[in-house]
Amino acid sequence: MGLFEILREQPIFYFSTLSVVILLSYFAFKNKLTKKRFNLPPGPPKLPIIGNLHQFGTAREVPPTSLRNLARKYGPIMHLKLGEISTVIISSARLAKEALKVHDLALANRPRIIGAEYLYFDHTGMAFAPYNSYWRYIRKVCILEVLSAKRVQSYTLIRREEVLNLVRRVSEHYPRPVNMSKMVGLYSNSNLCRAAFGREFTEGGDYDNYGFHHMLEEYQELLGGFSIGDFFPSLEFVLSLTGTKSRLVHAVSRFNQLFDRIIAEHRDPERVKDEKTTDIVDVLLDVQRNASGEMSLSMENVKGLILDVFAAGTDTSTIILDWTMTELMMNPHVMKKVQAEIRSIMGERKVVLDRDLPQMNYLKAVIKESLRLHPPAPVLLPRESSEHITIDGYDIPPKTRLYINAWAIGRDPESWEDPETFKPERFLGSSLDYKGTDFEFIPFGAGRRMCPGLSFGTAGVENALAQLLHSFDYELPPGVTAKDLDLSELFGITMSKKVSLELIAKPHFP
């Protein structure tokens, strides 16, 4: 059969072939024009249509690792074409400083993310909201009202009670192995829910009814996974065909049900409130009721902010504690040293108090070292350029998406000696901190879009880790060695351990 016969008999073949040819020609022409107009950073060759999407992450490597390996070849600033999206990846402290300090305002915006549009009620949460007057207002509310130092201090009793609940849960398993990953996850969730919602969602009951664990897993996957609409905005209609849209709608419905119930409880005039502690939902509802002329919050705005606190507060603390305990089991000399420090300070006293923590310098160094190697958000949330800028002499046109590979920066040999080794001593006597001013160490970001919940998260992690290390001595289950621990990772909006950590926790006190 000749060509004309094929076209006559199979017109669909003709039009699909023609469409592919036109698309290939369009993207090739567009890429050539872009290269001529701008001095873009170097980067790997691009495939037609998908660009470098196949290199963003592979079956064997999560995106932070793939991007670090590409950066070794193409440099600490490189240009990728992710579908239709022009993208710049930064993998060094020097260039992160130039981007997040020198050009912080020009890079303060967030790109449109399909998952955030649905889950955050049209980007009304602080993490994904575009940089505008609304975002500046809710950030001020969070810093001054929701997550202030005074507010974090007011949750001291909650933290102490939940840490002791954690110790009780762990001790109940001895002499059997305990799933430490699950235990620290339950702690982080309970601590966050009591501070944010004023009530417990412990294992069983509402915890299982709402399926918190599954809700967070779905949230991570929908926000951090591959969504064709995020990389091919012109093909957003495909979301309905792939089932992604229905998953997003279902996830929003589940969060809505949870938040509606919590808000209704807080607005109940007969509700008995804790006189000592005002939870975060109470604070947000007070802000909404007492809105000044500056701006007011809708109920959807309140829900978006609740989701910010709920998702980020639970997941980040769990990941830090899980990875830190894993690293300590792989480095028994560090475990011995940090336990000796804690027990020398505590003496025979069993319960760690907030006033003890400032003396525990090695404990803080252990947490910092864990954050250096395992930042909860290894690739910081994307930024988008609002104007033309230059970084390291290269053009960054408007509407360029920019990612900072914090995971690669924390392992950069230009910034760190022996970077792959877990060595907390590197932080002793050092002023390096994760508060956004030392760009070789930015697990929580820097600049305007830095995580505002740093104090809340740090307090919960330090208390829990100090108490766990004080209350128990740890061993791996029989037949398991440190070399057997599975360190594979699950990448989403954050990066957690794929396989839970199982330990035998022997009570230190009779």
Image (tube, rainbow, N blue to C red):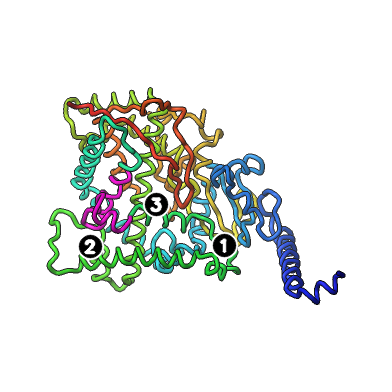
Label 2: which residue? Answer: 282
Reply above or below: 246 against 357.
below
Whole-angstrom CA distance, mark 2 to mark 1, is 38 Å
Of the 4 image quadrants, the one containing the C terminus is top left
- Residue sticking out furthest to the bottom: 8
Which residue appears at 46% of the width and 52% of the height? Answer: 493
The mark nearer the N terminus, 2 or 1, is 1
Highlighted range, magenta:
184-211
Q: Which mark is drawn over residue 228? A: 1
Query: Which element type, helix, strand or loop, lies under badge 3?
Result: loop
Residue 335 location in percent, x, y? 35, 26
Which residue appears at 55% of the width and 54% of the height? Answer: 402
Label 3: which residue? Answer: 451
Which residue appears at 20% of the width and 50% of the height? Answer: 154
Reply above or below: 473 against 41.
above
Main secondary structure type of the part rendered in magenta = helix
Of the 4 image quadrants, the one containing the N terminus is bottom right
Q: Nearer the viewer, residue 435 or 89?
A: 89
Residue 200: within the magenta? yes
Query: Which element type, helix, strand or loop, lies under badge 1?
Result: helix
Label 3 amino acid?
Answer: Cys
Confirm or deny contact between disc 3 and disc 1 (CB under 8 A). Answer: no
Query: Which element type, helix, strand or loop, lies under badge 2?
Result: helix
Residue 212 location in percent, x, y? 33, 55
Confirm or deny contact between disc 3 and disc 2 (CB under 8 A). Answer: no
Foreground mark, 2 or 1, reads 1
Label 2 amino acid?
Answer: Asp
Label 1 amino acid?
Answer: Ile
Foreground mark, 3 or 2, reads 2
In the image, is 29 to the left or to the right of 159?
right
Q: Which mark is drawn over residue 448? A: none
The mark nearer the N terminus, 3 or 1, is 1
